[in-house]
Image (cartoon, rainbow, N blue to C red):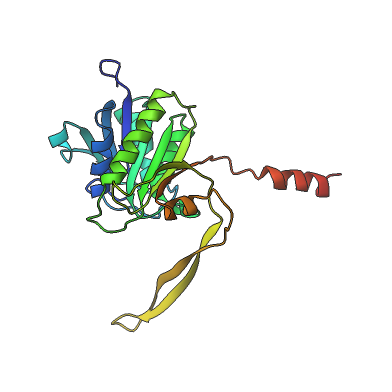
Amino acid sequence: MQLDNRPVILVTNDDGITAPGIRALVEAVKDLGTVVVVAPDSPQSGMGHAITIGKPLRLDRVSVFEDLGIEAYQCSGTPVDCVKLARDKILKGKPDLCVSGVNHGSNASINVIYSGTMSAAMEAAIEGIPSAGFSLLDYKFDADFTVSKKVAHTVASRMLEKQMPPNMLLNVNIPITTLGEFKGLKICRQADAKWAENFDHRIDPRGRDYYWMTGQFVNMDSGNGTDIEALKEGYASIVPIKFDFTDTIMKSWLEKEWGD
């Protein structure tokens, strides 16, 4: 799909096609090319890189962005399913760029592992499509996406202008701040942080046990240049992500210690 040599931009997310965050993202990039939206028909947060293999997938055209003149489809599957179907059945080829989000909530640091938003972008990058996932550190449904739209427009336009490497994948997180207080963009590394989880034991009205996951986010990284540090200072963090999980330092250690 290509109109008047304009780049084709695939927009997806994990919060569902009716989430305010994806509308903000569509509005941010709609003037940069021909935009097509393929997103889940319901929230898929925390799905990571899950794919649907045990049941059929449904893909339906919807009028969610008709007021913007944007072609859109909802998918019954996961965010990764959305990207796979978009490439194979809707676009019938690779778009020039894939953007995912804007997620309602942080995907900084270790959150990238669990994120459906980032997994959708990662799937596109695996397919050789430069991609970026955008997340706002505000979980509220009615969050203010003004700064997010500015960040997404800037990042997407730069990625299109600079002709990024095909497997380029960026994790972009945006602080809760006003446009006047926003500090700008900062290239970062992923902080060493994790969720310290607890499971609250409860009993339902029928007397059966169930568990509700709780916990807190613990940052163990006191070094400089992390995404967590940048966000606290009022910057949007940009972390280049790779899907090759090989630990080259550990590989060298194992070859030395375990080698014949």
Residue at left 54%, top 46%?
Answer: 189
In the rendered structure, the answer to whether residue 77 lies left or right of residue 245 reads: left
In the depicted structure, whether residue 145 falls above or below residue 213 = above
Query: Which part of the image, by quadrant, shows the C terminus?
Result: top right
Residue 246 visible in this rendered orientation of the protein? yes
- Please tell me which residue is depicted at 46% across the width and 42% down the height of the picture: 186
Q: Which residue: 29% across, 27% down?
A: 32
* Side of 162 where 143 appears, left or right: left
Q: Residue furthest left?
A: 67
Instruction: Residue at 41% x, 38% y: name it.
Output: 132
Q: Is residue 139 above or below residue 84?
A: below
**Picture coordinates of residue 175 (x, y %)?**
37, 52
| Place of residue 199 in the rendered image (x, y in percent of width and height, measured from the top left) | 45, 74
Q: Nearer the viewer, residue 161 or 11?
A: 161
Instruction: Say whether residue 170 is left or right of residue 20.
Output: right
Which quadrant: the N terminus? Answer: top left
Q: Can see residue 94?
A: no
User: As drawn, which residue projects farthest toward the right?
Assistant: 260
Position in image of residue 151 (x %, y %): 34, 40
Q: Is residue 153 above or below residue 252?
A: above
The furthest residue to the front? 180
